Amino acid sequence: MDLADGPLPMTVSLPPQVVREFQEVGRLLWEAGLVSFHGGNMSVRLPEGLIVVTRHGAMLGRLEAQDLMILGAEGEPSWDTPIHQAIYSVTQAGAVLHAHPVHAVALSYGRRELRPQDLEGRHHLGEMVPVVPKGDHVPQALAVHPVAIWEGHGCYARGDDLWQALKYASVLEESARILWLRQAFP
């Protein structure tokens, strides 16, 4: 189905397990402090090639089925949906999430990369996490890395599913906290 053809028929419905995954991951993002009350967004690529994304202003910690939309359907998707679409076009990702991890964002100012100092961070994220100056640089960074930081804004993580993307965002914030503490207490 070509998304440029206009709104999708109302007969398209989301599988309950997709809605549940959005709800569970969204709640964990909020509980972990990786997003504020109305911050962040998530998307999933369905097997049919359709993309499900959170609506603009959705509260990730309290998602309802009506907070999710299939791209091409009526409604207002998250403002950075084009970044999600570009990530899907350059990766095989099954899911993308955008969060605002405080320590990672704070450390991103004036840098082009963060280098995890902890073993878990290096194991899951590699030797470095790219920091990009603009949102349109995120997709190319995620073509190579599982997570990237948009300087001063937040992180984008990709994965086979939302759980894997959550893992990368969570490990990034933990690594950033460790780096922050190492710098504060050399």
Image (cartoon, helix red, strand yellow):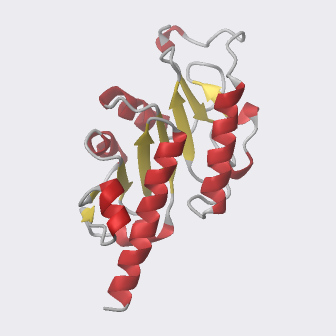
- Is residue 132 visible in the rendered structure shown here? no
Q: Quadrant of residue 86?
A: top left
Residue at image x 33%, y 42%?
A: 136
Residue at image x 57%, y 33%?
A: 53
Q: Quadrant of residue 171?
A: bottom left
Residue 181, image x and y in percent? 40, 83
Q: Is residue 67 shown left or right of residue 86?
A: right
Residue 10, image x and y in percent? 71, 12
Residue at image x 47%, y 39%?
A: 96
Q: Is residue 6 shown left or right of residue 21?
A: left
Q: Is 127 located above or below residue 60 in the figure?
A: below
Q: Is 76 located above or below residue 48 in the figure?
A: below
Between 165 and 135, which is closer to the camera in this rendering?
165
Q: Is residue 37 shown left or right of residue 77?
A: right
- Is residue 89 visible in the rendered structure shown here? yes
Residue 70, image x and y in percent? 60, 23
Residue 163, image x and y in percent? 53, 44
Residue at image x 42%, y 47%?
A: 157
Please state, as top left, top right, bottom left or bottom right, where the C terminus lies in the image.
Answer: bottom left
Q: Quadrant of residue 57?
A: top right
Q: Is 141 located above or below residue 39 in the figure?
A: above
